[in-house]
Image (spheres, rainbow, N blue to C red):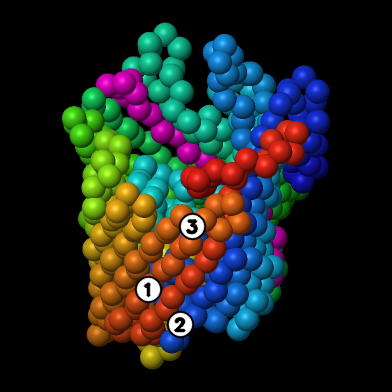
Amino acid sequence: MRYFFLGIWCGLLMLAYCPFVYGQRVNQYQIEVGGLASSDQTPFWLRANQYGIVPLKNPVSRLNAALRSDYRQIDSTGYRPKIDWGYGVNVVANVGATNQFLIPEAYIKGRFGAFELYAGRRKEIIGLVDTLLTSGSYIWSGNTLPIPKIQLAIPVFTAVPFTKGVISVMGTFSHGWFENADRLVTGSYLHQSSFYGRLGKSSWRFRLYGGLNHQVMWAGHSDYLDASVAKNGNLPSNIRYYPSVVLGTRNSYADDQSIQTTTHFEENRIGNHLGSIDLAADVNLNHWNLFAYRQFVYDDGSLFYGTNLDDGLNGLRIRNRDLPTGATFFLRQITLEYLFTGSQGGDVFILDDPKRRGRDDYFNNSQYIDGWTYFGRTIGTPFLTPQQEVSSSLPPRYGIANNRVSLFHFGLSALLFNKVDITTRLSYSRNAGTYQIPYLTIPTQFSGLLTASLPINFLGGTVLNGSLALDSGKLLPNSVGAYVGLRKMGLLSHKRRLIVSPQSLY
């Protein structure tokens, strides 16, 4: 399998150097230096959904540098090449209580018509959700370093032929690799696919959306698994199993000893399957856009039998369609969300009774005991918390220690004095741990953030940004923290002429 994906990578490199698609190209750059400090553990909203670049321990000084080139846009003649390519590189250095050199992004991508192929690490959020102020998309929130993948996709909603734009689709199909460092199960793969549809033209006032995503952890080896879930510590890894992984079917090769022997555990399905089914709608009013969404979660069959319908993410985004008016306060956007994961199909698991197959234990798995994590961070919503983040006074649990959550979340974005961008995130949750190791006291938690960005005349134009954050409650250590940074951004043309841009490129 690795040679097959290596061939795709080489094909992308050839596309990158193809003279027929190169043409004129503009590089975008961003450099930021800053410092972070807090009274205890880094407050939740200073580190959550930041693609894993903010450490738990501080103080920290940070250098964040990025360079990217996107696809060429439609020019003055209305022409845009069907074949094109782009790239992105982002490096982060943290120095202080935690020393790190991280690469959140390093990818090359190619486009052919509506299709895109990319390889590497790339920042992504998966699911129908507001991406600016959300508490986090349930299954893939941008809370961790991006997982290296090779992905074929229709990356944006694209009209289905002969529907005149009334029906549009987007989707992905990818293969990725989990890390081996500090993980009890090593050599694991990621299969990821998604499909979403839209009913209604982009010019219409009202549109409906729907779709699903499918995530699978599969393959690997561990010295910590007993014989009931792994044969000599080995999990099914042969490429012959790949169709069963993709389709989520029961093991079709249980009697074929020539490829690999599986345990009774895999007679259910090969790998750990999870994801969400999403519905959404948006409407354009005269001055506002309303976007409502619901993410139903699946992890262990309860959604199929309808026993965990209470669980999921509910959201409403209210976005201002008008341009800033120069007023003292201009409201850009409000986001309201409610996340509930307390049902999980109920507190009883009886295999032969579909209505009582509960205790889904979201983001945990009997084979992949590290859980739905990457380098110790939750891949999905950060409110399902791993053990290293919660207070030491709570009962310990390896993997995801707290996955039964009731969360209220509020986000706001505004412009002050026609100059200062501000955002705030305010979150209040009740937390019950897991069915296996519950939190009997149901600790509550408040986490808040206020961020402000101000353009200043320094080095030809930079942005001064600062953040204040607070954690108060019984789930996380109580902490107050702050971040101050200076960001420079702009365009680097193909002739290497510097053009300063007053707006963020990201």
Q: Looking at the image, tell me whether mark 1 or mark 3 is earlier in sequence order.
A: 3
Amino acid type shown at disc 2: Ser
Q: Which quarter of the figure has residue 234?
A: bottom right
What label does residue 469 carry, if any?
1
| Residue range highlighted in magenta | 175-204
Whether 246 is drawn above or below 385: the answer is above
Residue corresponding to mark 2: 38
Q: Secondary structure at mark 2?
A: strand
Question: Where residue 100 sits in the image (x, y, percent)?
Answer: 67, 72
Q: Position of residue 271 (x, y in %)?
A: 56, 54
Q: Earlier in the sequence, mark 3 or mark 2?
A: 2
Q: Secondary structure at mark 1?
A: strand
Is residue 257 left or right of 286 when viewed as pictured?
right
> Pointer 2 and pointer 1: residues touching (CB < 8 Å)?
yes
Q: Nearer the viewer, mark 1 or mark 3?
A: 3
Query: Residue at 48% of width from left, 38% of height from top?
Result: 194
Picture coordinates of residue 171, whole percent (x, y) = 49, 33
Q: Is residue 246 above or below residue 424?
A: above
Q: Amino acid at mark 1?
A: Ala
Q: Is residue 360 visible?
A: yes
Tell me how far mark 1 sits from mark 3, CA to CA: 23 Å
The residue that disc 3 covers is 456
